[in-house]
Amino acid sequence: MKIAVVTSHPPFVQGGHLVIAKGLVRALLDSGHSAELILTPQNRFGRQGAAYLSTWLTDVSVDHASQAVDQVISLRYPSYAVRHPVHVCWINHRMREYYDQWDRFRSSLSWKGKFKESFRRRLIHAADGYLLKRNVRKLFSQSKTIQNRLQSWGGIPSEVLYPPPPPRPYRCDNYGDYFFIASRLTPLKRIHLVIEALAQREADGIRCVIAGSGESLLELKSRIVEYGLSERVRLVGAISDEELIDYLACCRAVCFPTYAEDYGLVSVEAFASRKPVITCVDSGGPAELVIDRKNGMVCSPTAESLAGAMRMLMDDRNLAERMGDSAYKCSAELTWSRTIEKLILT
């Protein structure tokens, strides 16, 4: 089959949804299909209508040689506006500022901004409702968190289909003396909680490597200096796929205390590397995957709780190994072959 994988993508950002899209294309190719990734625009606030319209007008029915494209698989807003008679959406998220993050977003606006964005929000809700109910033949959610949001805002039914780890050569070299974080550095990821946890007496001596870039970088640097953690916390910036695999292979565990995450791809990448994951009860997707005290630790979103979990895993290497083995078994159940079976309509 000839399959177009379609997702939107803002410039100068490497998000998890794009990693999943590229992994899906590779898995389709490995399965003998013809597949290609198509990126549609994601405009800034105030210009989302143009992005929806341009995606709606994008022709994916045939390739450059006028050969028919058999199916489309879209991932996130507004890529699901693309039209095709056999359209499956494996949704990562809608425009969260107009859904679960609306109250937080609205609080930062002037009264004029609140009026304009409230009007745009109604338009986006109407467009998403039509597209996900009428323009898509089958809808899958990448987590229960996303499934619940679709039901809460729009009454849109979907089936949960967790993404497998991207097809990379994961390995476990050892259970080293540091925790690892790989994430965009934004407030919702709550990396500051890890910095605060490391400043607790209970976490004395524990080291951490943080990979990623984003708007919270300067704040995190300031906190590291303020808490006297410069010798124990390394900010390594954006890293390559090879470096990601190396860090995962050698860390003690992965820490990901994000808030209301859609899925959290790094969790299953840690599992595939036989490493447990520390997350929080309100972390969304990661909290669906991590079973407390089995393949990781699920904490309260406080510095004290995170520090206790980190101390426990750092003091007991055997515990980390046992949890890592359980994590690996969980990741092995998430396969690309099963995923493709679900996503392809025959």
Image (tube, grey):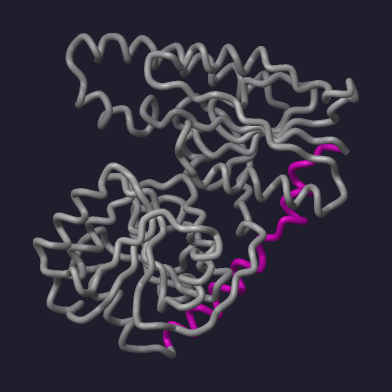
Q: Where is residue 120 in the image (x, y as percent from the top left)?
A: 39, 12
- Relative vertical location of residue 292 with respect to residue 204 in this rendering, above or below: above
- Determine whether, in the image, residue 28 is placed left or right of residue 147: right
- Relative vertical location of residue 84 with respect to residue 39 in this rendering, above or below: above
Magenta region, main secondary structure: helix
Q: Where is residue 156 in the image (x, y as percent from the top left)?
A: 56, 29
- Determine whether, in the image, residue 338 is placed left or right of residue 103: right
Q: Magenta includes 337?
A: yes
- Relative vertical location of residue 326 with respect to residue 266 in this rendering, above or below: below
- Determine whether, in the image, residue 314 is placed left or right of residue 9: left
Picture residue at 54% right of the left edge, 21% below the top = 128
Picture residue at 53% right of the left edge, 82% below the top = 173
Q: Magenta includes 137?
A: no
- Determine whether, in the image, residue 315 is placed left or right of residue 199: right
Q: Give the range drawn in magenta.
A: 319-346
Of 250 and 327, which appears nearest the observer?
250
Q: Give the quarter of the figure containing the C terminus.
A: top right
Of 277 and 33, which appears nearest the observer?
33
Q: Give the quarter of the figure containing the N terminus.
A: top right
